[in-house]
Amino acid sequence: GAVVSQHPSWVICKSGTSVKIECRSLDFQATTMFWYRQFPKQSLMLMATSNEGSKATYEQGVEKDKFLINHASLTLSTLTVTSAHPEDSSFYICSARDGNSRAYEQYFGPGTRLTVT
Amino acid sequence: AQSVAQPEDQVNVAEGNPLTVKCTYSVSGNPYLFWYVQYPNRGLQFLLKYITGDNLVKGSYGFEAEFNKSQTSFHLKKPSALVSDSALYFCAVRGADNFNKFYFGSGTKLNVKP
């Protein structure tokens, strides 16, 4: 149980275009999902916390107009990178919190490799 | 404030030998601690967690971790390393002010040589 999927697993796009990444919890309901960014050989950087049915909470320094997050249902959150630039190239990982777990543990998706040319 | 430190960027161990990946934490209140493993170009896989109870926690793939409150440590261990254990390991602590927030260490690359 507790499986999180992401789609696509990798994407290449041209500078100036927008890219949408989906994160789904497959066998549990996730009232809260998280979006992380990971640079090569570095730790995960939390970008935003996504709550179903409400606006996402962004971490300091993350542009909310550039990284649009929508959490439309209890099993789906999307991250849209708008007007992508090469510096947005990174590995994006989502996670979902199992609302029934008192430890608030998070289950992670396999990640999406974004390359902006 | 809460934080996690993984003092070693890399740990090298021979297959069959025991391994330890170190983690120390700082958080107010009772710590909720986690270990995750990441293989290249993959997301994080949950290994184990400490919430309360026994200081020695057993997890997936033969890994275990020892919680030491006085030393504020949560070191990951395995009695006999496998080449397939080679990966990046992250320690994390749940935020005390925001339960939704996890604070990750910088990661430790484990290399197990045959």
Image: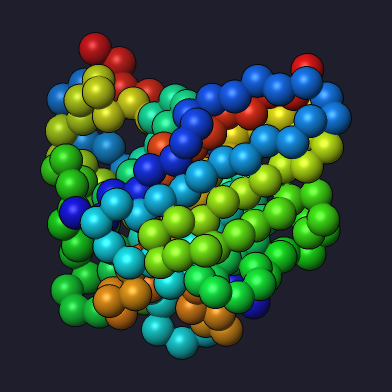
- Which quadrant holds residue A82? top right
- Residue B91 x/y as whole percent: 44, 54
- Which quadrant holds residue B72? bottom left
Residue B23 visible: no
- From the image, which quarter does the N terminus of chain A lie in? bottom left
Q: Name the residue nearer the viewer: A30 or B32.
A: A30
Q: Tell me the colour scheme of the image.
A: rainbow
Q: What residue do we see at 56% from left, 51% from top? A: A78
Q: How many marks?
A: 0
Residue B37 visible: yes
- Residue B4 x/y as whole percent: 54, 61
- From the image, which quarter does the C terminus of chain A lie in? top right
Q: What residue do we see at 85% from left, 30% from top? A: A16
Q: Name the residue nearer the viewer: B60 or A30.
A: A30
Q: Name the residue nearer the viewer: B34 or B113.
A: B34
Q: What residue do we see at 65% from left, 68% from top? A: A56
Q: Name the residue nearer the viewer: B26 or A74.
A: A74
- Residue A51 x/y as whole percent: 54, 71
Residue reaching furthest front?
A: A72
Residue reaching furthest top?
A: B114
Q: Is residue B82 above or below residue A39?
A: above
Q: What residue do we see at 24% from left, 12% from top? A: B114
- Residue B105 x/y as whole percent: 54, 52
Q: Is residue A69 left or right of residue A96?
A: right
- Which quadrant holds residue A47? bottom right
Q: Is residue B84 above or below residue B48?
A: above
Residue reaching furthest bottom?
A: B29
